[in-house]
Amino acid sequence: MLEGLVQHDFPLNLQHVLGRMRGVFGDSEVVTLNGDGTTRAKYSEVCQRVDRLANALDSLGVKEGDRVATFGWNSQRHLEAYLAIPCMGAVLHTLNIRLFPDQLIYIANHAEDRIVFVDDVLVPVLEKMAGEFETVEHFVVMGDGDCGSLPNVIRYEELIADQPSTFDWPELQDNQAAGLAYTSGTTGNPKGVLYSHRSQLLHAFGTCLADAMGLQAFDRVLPVVPMFHVNAWGIPYAAGLIGSDLVMPMQFLQAEPLAKLIEEERVTIAAGVPTVWLDLLNYADEHKPDLSSIRTVIGGGSAVPLALMQAFQERHGITITQAWGMTEMSPLGTVARPPAGLEEDEHWRYRDSAGRIMPLVEARLITGDGEEAPWDGTSTGELEVRGPWIASGYYEDPTGRDKFHDGWLRTGDIASIDSQGFVKITDRAKDVIKSGGEWISSVELEGELMAHPDVAEAAVIAKPDERWQERPLACVVCREGASLSAEDLIEHLRPRVAKWWLPDEISFIDEVPKTSVGKFDKKVLRKRLEAGELESEPVSQPA
Ligand code: ADP
């Protein structure tokens, strides 16, 4: 082999992000919302504090490979932990504050966390379980609030106060572990995804591409998606790499404070799950805040309803760009930037997809027979992916091995892919409704139901059926003040979906149950159905 004469050994690690924040983007800023206003710091100041934090962790005995956890909202201090911990060779473990106590105890013990950084406002949540964290030696409280009954507490500011503002950063290997996040999973124990420096840096690089999130140095980016949820979709590292300002919302994730933050901080890119944007839309319709600074909103984590995207575009001139991914993918896999020059309908068809496969990510569709399905836009199969920021296994957990085979990750999503690499997620493998040997997409039915102006939310689950095996049951939440009958909804659906997809029953419910991370929790609905607690109206359907 004739080897290329380039610097193959150039390190691909997060110290590069820190270096750019310090050396190139010292004037970029991070703004953190607090109860009374905002706290601001330039990246140059953040980097000095990162050095002091690394010195402090070193003095607490943190060694390379040690897991150091955070239990916090999006803030400047959390950003400092994001940088200091991996750049000193330790592993940043972001605990998801929304998980159930049993899951968190399992996770902290499984990861063998040595230190936990916690926001003062979250002390009441953490203290209930802290006694059962077997390996944690110190709790570092971020903020001046009460430390409650937490043992071995150190205050963040006291911890770093007298530390030198330079640190002797170690040489790191690209493959060295940098971050750890657990997926809550639907069965069994949560599973750890262990990111490396290389995977995080390449993912940040990919995130910045114009056809991905498209961060630029002039942007002011608001990650509404929490830093305890797949690294806030990689935004903190991407922003550091490219020099965007960061606007951190802490726990103020309701529509009103978010709208004010966007208005006052002139946010240009915001990212979060669809429920956040749904609330913001309602708020914006009523209060007309000035959202004109926004270039794009990134929506993902679950399907972004087409009606929501269209409403934002038409009524507020805001483009919501849909993205798809998962914890095992760092998380970004696809982003829906439609081709130029399309007719309106075609344009929206692309916007309504999960998006085009990102560079450095490869995908394939595997059918029930184990065959590869063609990229024709209609054939479906389980979506499998591989690439440099895709997990190759779970951390110290052999039970999840079946998710990985031949170098591919089984995503558990059913999808089609068109000839241009645009992916359409039709369902979760476990949510698809198998009716008479054919598949009905619960996601598509939900999208069509939610396009009805009087429907606030809709979740479709499979109801066991003697003749067809399964039939769709639609659980619908009406908008306040609206009243709908099962027949109204079927009439609405009739021109939009195949006849055999029409639900036989509609259950009107007050709210769709959500998981700890805000996704529709169909497990709960299935359980209610099984227990006979889901009342429904049958629909009379003329043949
Ligand atoms: P995250 O933590 O990023 O939400 P999870 O690992 O919890 O990731 O969940 C990933 C799953 O969320 C995907 O496999 C998919 O089912 C769903 N998902 C994410 N984004 C989308 C999207 N844009 N459209 C449909 N489903 C999505």
Image (tube, grey):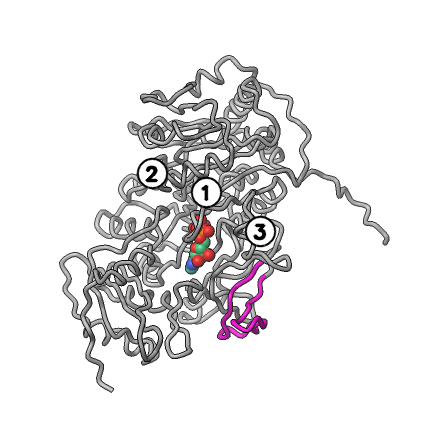
231 vs 502, left or right, is right
Task: Indicate the quadrant containing the C terminus: top left, top right, bottom left or bottom right.
Answer: bottom left
Write the start and end of the magenta stretch as one range.
Answer: 363-385
Residue 232 numbered mark, or none: 1
- Ligand 1 has an atom within 8 Å of the beta carbon of the residue at disc 1: no
Which mark is in front, 2 or 3?
3
Q: Secondary structure at mark 1?
A: helix
Which mark is in front, 1 or 3?
3
The x, y position of residue 92, in whole percent, is 52, 34
Give the residue number, with chain letter if any, for mark 2: 261
Q: CA distance from mark 2 to mark 3?
A: 33 Å
> Which image quadrant for residue 256?
top left
Question: For the residue marked with disc 3, what is the amino acid?
Answer: Ile
Q: Confirm or deny contact between disc 1 and disc 2 (CB under 8 A).
A: no
Please tell me whether residue 364 belongs to the stretch shown in magenta. Answer: yes
Q: Secondary structure at mark 3?
A: loop
- Residue 538 visible in rendering: yes
Quick one: label 2 or label 3, which is nearer the N terminus? Answer: 2
The x, y position of residue 69, in whole percent, is 48, 32
At x 16%, y 67%, the residue is 484
Q: Nearer the viewer, residue 519 or 166?
A: 519
Ligand 1 found in image quarter: bottom left
Task: Indicate the quadrant containing the N terminus: top left, top right, bottom left or bottom right.
Answer: bottom right
Please tell me whether residue 142 belongs to the stretch shown in magenta. Answer: no
Give the residue number, with chain letter if any, for mark 3: 390
Question: For the residue marked with disc 1, what is the amino acid?
Answer: Ala
Quick one: label 1 or label 3, which is nearer the N terminus? Answer: 1
